[in-house]
Amino acid sequence: MTVTEDLSILSLIANASVLVKLVMALLAGVSFMSWYWIFRKWFAIREARKKTEQFERDFWSGGDLNALYQSAVNDRHHAGAMERIFEAGYREFTKLRSKSHDHGAIIDGARRAMRASYQREVDDIEAHLAFLASVGSVSPYVGLFGTVWGIMNAFRGLSSVGTATLAHVAPGIAEALVATAIGLFAAIPAVVAYNRFAHDIDRLAIRFESFMEEFSNILQRTLR
């Protein structure tokens, strides 16, 4: 077998030690899972943004709050995050208004209901972001572990060789470096996606919080 054949990617993976192969398999599996969640999260955030914009248009068009509430209740499973926040706040508002005349308590109750719904929605949107962060931070070190182990094996193999040449050293070191390459291949997309998604989710969260404040003011004016 020639040195060129030994240094082909498939040959390097096939000829790697058992531990390095396990590291490569782990990183390949992690990379596959991270790409799965990258696409899932991208579609989820895009859908959340689309539904938020649609509800904002409906809400600020001057429609009746009761009609918006009934629409949110009837189509709750397909409603967006902001629509469910509105539903929770308006439900609590109508419930407390029928039982109490304390305007402050009514508004505080509606705000607490919206805050609880807001937290659930943001937690749902942020789901699996921690996995992407872990992949981005840990994968290079896992690949580096495989590389160090492979290089150790390569140099240990030189002990039985009288004269070390590039032909003896290159295949073992190249096999080891493949683990680092796979680790970077898993880490880089995960880091880029995490930063992008975190930014998009922060912007959505700000829109939700602004809506809760504005809606609270509308409810307060309704009580006057």
Image (tube, rainbow, N blue to C red):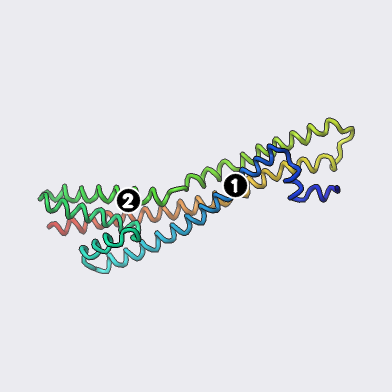
Residue 29's label in the rendered image is: 1
Instruction: Return the residue nearer the eye: 190 or 218.
Output: 190
Marks 2, 1: nearer the viewer = 1
Quadrant hosting residue 16: top right
The extreme right residue here reads: 162
Does dot 1 land on a helix, a strand or a loop? Answer: helix
Instruction: Return the residue nearer the eye: 3 or 188.
Output: 3
Could you tell whether 203 is left or right of 210 in the image?
A: right
Mark 2 to mark 1: distance in Å? 34 Å
Residue at (85, 31) in percent of width and height: 160
Residues tagged 2 and 1 counted as in contact (Cβ below 8 A): no
Give x and y (percent) for residue 201. 42, 53
Which quarter of the image is occupied by the C terminus?
bottom left
Q: Amino acid at mark 2?
A: Tyr
Residue at (68, 41) in percent of width and height: 21
Could you tell whether 84 is left or right of 203 in the image?
A: left
